[in-house]
Amino acid sequence: MATTETTDPRATLRDGLPDRYLTPEDLTVMFSLPSVETVYAWRKKRVGPPGFRVGKHLRFDPAAVHAWVTEQAALEDAA
């Protein structure tokens, strides 16, 4: 018998990464940021993960966010 589970779409992972593009709100939750404005400030200062616009909406590729996190960890280890 097959079981039917209700899962949060955010919990769906492929190779450890979400199966969809991330929103600024997703990054706020993932990194426990004080507000979504922090994500927009990162983008304005060009210090955060690379994002792109879909119309008026900002989105982030999960693989690019993962690469950015890895880069940040390497920079911290080198310091």
Image (spheres, rainbow, N blue to C red):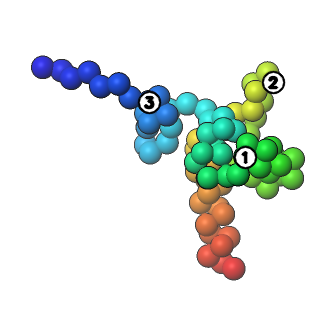
Q: Quadrant of residue 5?
A: top left
In this image, 9 relative to 21: left or right?
A: left
Q: How many marks?
A: 3
Q: Quadrant of residue 24?
A: top right
Q: Which residue extends farthest right?
A: 44
Distance Cα–Cα, label 3 vs label 2: 25 Å
User: Image point 55% across, 30% down: which residue?
Assistant: 20
Residue 61 is at least partly visible in this image: no
In the drawing, what numbered circle is on residue 5?
none
Q: Which residue is mark 1?
A: 35
SS of the residue at dot 3? loop
The residue carrying pointer 3 sits among few (fewer than 14), some (14 to 19) or many (20 or more) residues within 10 Å by Cα, namely: few
Q: Which residue is mark 3?
A: 8
Q: Quadrant of residue 3?
A: top left
User: Image point 72% across, 46% down: which residue?
Assistant: 35
Amino acid on which the number 3 mark rests in the picture? Asp
- In percent of width and height, residue 45 lies at 87, 53
Q: Which residue is mark 2?
A: 56
Residue 12 is at least partly visible in this image: yes
In this image, 7 relative to 70: left or right?
A: left
Distance Cα–Cα, label 2 vs label 1: 19 Å
Earlier along the polypeptide chain: callout 3 or callout 1?
Answer: 3
